[in-house]
Amino acid sequence: MKNIIDEETQLAERVFDERELYIAKRMGFSDAAVAKLWNTAEAEVFSFRLEHGIKPVYKMIDTCASEFASYVPYFYSTYEEENESVVSGREKIVVLGSGPIRIGQGVEFDYSTVHAVKTIKSSGYEAIIINNNPETVSTDYTTSDKLYFEPLTPEDVLNIIELEKPKGVIATLGGQTAINLARSLAERGVTLIGTGCDAIERAENRDAFEKLLSELGIPQPTGRAVTNIEEGIRAAAEIGYPVLVRPSYVLGGRAMEIVAKESALRHYLKYAVEIDKDKPVLVDKYIYGKELETDAICDGTDVYTGGIMELVERTGVHSGDSISIYPTYSVSEKVKSKILDYTKRLGLGIGIIGLYNIQFIVDSDENVYIIEVNPRSSRTVPFLSKATGVPLADIATLVCLGKSLREQGITESHHSGSKRWYVKAPAFSFSKLDGIDAYLSPEMKSTGEAIGYDNSLHRALYKALIATGINLPNYGTVIVTLADEDKAEALPLVKRFYDMGFNIEATTMTAEFLRAHGIKARIRRKISEGSTEILDSISAGYVSYVINTRAILSGVHYEDGAIIRRCANRNNVTIFTSLDTVKVLLDVLEEITIGVSTIDA
């Protein structure tokens, strides 16, 4: 540690010193770290390195433990002398992977990377992957022609490009991590294949996106990008509470919240996010409605929509944490037609070349609003590809390589639908992540997903839910604790549990409400009143489900709920914080218990 600190001091004193830079690079200093010490731009450090021949070499990972000679094209960088990566004379395409799996971005993004590589190889190019996650298929050294196990940073990617000199780089198949590199790579002269920087900017820059939507006549929730706290307070007052707030360019809805009053918004802007002119926060009107999404491919002339997926949970729950159903089960042909129209107009208007994803809100009057457009592959591409049998990532890769949809024989505008039901259900790891709140919100918390499919929607739902590892008993006790605004909607749901023979336990106010409507409910006093009755019930082992909702419109949140949710997780009791999910669960339980079916025609 002392050696590193000493070198940092030396480096700061010897600005643009060739020998000192070489020593620093051998010790692991990044160009960005050197640039900070030299008070210059990272690009300047990179150029200085190249001018003086300070480049990494690439060592092969020895899969044979030196027992015999072998050449396995699986490399890592180091600042030494001998380079073991043999550069061929073939035309090369580099595909950027999705980096480490973490909450918000998982292995589903690796699907697109792997399929792209197979298509690139079959098209006659040398396929090179840059990725640094040992648990993905893309980092299996048999997947690509060459694999560089390197961090997904501008410096490390540019070092490889400097060595390999590829025809181009695809940055839109590795999720948000890869696409965030597009701008810095393009500014250094790298050729991006597929969707370019201008299109990415139109989709992800708030001002540019709003201008485009206005030109296309496509509505979105009223909103504004703000750069300081007071501006945010004024914007929310004009828009009207509740509002959805989030940082721009987020991954997995990180730090995204629904805020119902000024004090909560002030607290959010002060403590939850960094806010300045370079890091604006988006303040949008929260619209309560159904959420749907599409994955589509645009070649610059035509658009193919892979399908429309309907999310079970209404707006306010991140799409990655929602149960997703294909084909749609409750929206009209008019809404579907409008979604397909918007998908086509946006793909062409933004200038997408390849895959993109759009999320929509449909309100009670069947108005369709755009939430956002992701100018890249999304986490639903594997699901939709499996559900429809259409290899979206392969088709999109050929589009990126210059082969239009029509040249590929795709002349229809969208997938015509399916006779079977396909359900994508999220999987959570709350029991393993101690301290995390299980309440579903705009910030993604799931760590995986599973698919169920069947001719019956309820059976498909049952298969998907079981596959995620949750318990679905059709007997026992349900603990109910509800926000006032949810009680009327929850009443018929609780009655359905009651009619199936479940015992009901509830907090005082909820129990009194249920009793007034003919449901026998045992009262359990609140934790905030000094009681442990609810926690004792959960810990006793006879509770099958906990239903716990939190007020959105009033913005009043109690610590009791978080304690109950943590207790349920520790005791492996299935917990629901969205009434939409409860409704789906009851449909499934009624079908497997008494043969009732309410959704299937």
Image (spheres, rainbow, N blue to C red):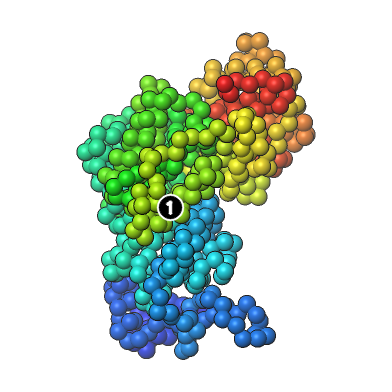
Give the residue at x 66% y 46%.
Answer: 431
Location of residue 331 in the rendering, given as x and y in whole percent from the top left corner: 45, 26
Would residue 442 be found to the left or right of residue 494 on screen? left
Mark 1, residues whose alpha carbon is within 10 Å: few (<14), some, or many (≥20)?
A: many
Quarter of the figure with residue 569: top right
**In the figure, 36 relative to 196: above or below?**
below
Location of residue 30 in the rendering, given as x and y in whole percent from the top left corner: 41, 74
Identify the image quadrant of the C terminus.
Answer: top right
For this rendering, which residue is in front, 100 or 525?
100
**In the figure, 472 relative to 502: above or below?**
below
**In the figure, 287 relative to 158: above or below?**
above
Residue at the disc numbered 1: 395
- Say if residue 530 shows up in the picture: no
Give the residue at x 62% y 31%.
Answer: 455
Location of residue 207 in the rendering, given as x and y in whole percent from the top left corner: 25, 45
At numbered mark 1, what does the secondary structure look like: helix, strand or loop?
Answer: helix
Quarter of the figure with residue 477: top right
Please state which amino acid type lies under the numbered disc 1.
Answer: Ile
Figure label count: 1
Would residue 407 be found to the left or right of residue 528 on screen? left
Location of residue 418 in the rendering, given as x and y in whole percent from the top left corner: 52, 35
Give the residue at x 44% y 42%.
Answer: 306
For this rendering, which residue is in front, 37 or 124?
124
Give the residue at x 70% y 21%.
Answer: 595
- Say if residue 62 shows up in the picture: yes
